[in-house]
Structures are given as C-alpha cells and as structure tokens.
Amino acid sequence: MTRVLLAEDEALLREILVEGLADEGFEVEAALDGMEALILYRTKGPFDALLLDEEMPGLTGRQLLRLLRGEGATVAAVIFSGNLVLDDDERAELGVGPVLRKPVSMRDICAALRDAIAGRK
C-alpha cells in the first residue's frame, strides 16, 4: 500500500483528504502542521509521498520540504496552496512535483501523488 504523509492545518479539509485518499487506496498519516509532520516523518516513515499544505503555522510546506531535503530525504512531494506559485528553479530545488491550487479535486490530488511517486522511482 502506498503511504502518504499529509500535512494540513485546517481540520475539516484534513479529515476530507484522509478519507478521500484512503478511499483511493492510500495509507495516510495526517499531521496538523509542519512540525508534527516532521515528527511523524522521522518516527513513522518511510513514506512514499508527502502531501503538504503550504500555509501552516510553525513550518510551511516549503520549509518542511527544505529541511527534509537538507537531511537527504528523496521522498516524492506535492504541495497544495491557495495562492502559491513556484518557478521551475524552486520546484527543482525542492524536488517537488506540480503545485496544486486550492480548491482542488481528489482526482487531481491522487493523480499528482501517483505522478510524483512514479517520477521518484
């Protein structure tokens, strides 16, 4: 089963994402912010992919990803946000696939995760 670490600070959206991803066959660990995601990554990994909200208290999705990349993590990653736009250089630096803009469909999220994972293999 494909393991995904989700970091989303909005409780209702986090719950919807956990249920939707599980329905699509993903095993999900959910964190309510970037710091909790970092702890879960280190204690419950390995994960096949990260699904990170950009705008969270503590650590943003990009800050978390930079930290993990700095530690040598090569896990696939997808960032989603209401207004974030990454240029090609920053996407390459972060090793991240497409940045999804909220609102985004569960189908698009699952496709982005699968594409990101396939691109890492």
Image: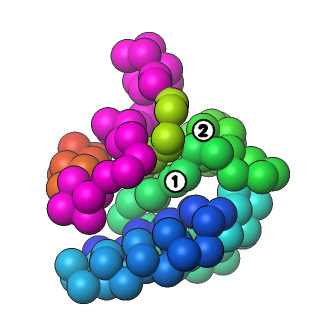
Mark 2: which amino acid?
A: Arg
Task: Find the residue positioned furthest to the right.
Answer: 58
Please report the residue visible at 49 percent of the width from the left and 43 percent of the height from the top.
81
Q: Is residue 31 above or below residue 118?
A: below
**In this rendering, would 106 be left or right of 95?**
left
The residues bearing labels 1 and 2 have C-alpha atoms spaced at a distance of 8 Å
Q: Position of residue 118 (x, y in %)?
A: 19, 52
Disc 1 to disc 2: CB gap under 8 Å: yes
| Region in magenta | 85-110
Q: Which residue is mark 1?
A: 52
User: In the depicted view, which residue is nearer to us: 104 or 110?
Assistant: 104
Q: Which residue is mark 2?
A: 62
The secondary structure type at the circle numbered 2 is helix
Color theme of the render: rainbow
The secondary structure type at the circle numbered 1 is strand
**In this rendering, would 29 be left or right of 96?**
right
Mark 1: which amino acid?
A: Leu
Mark found first going from the N terminus, 1 or 2: 1
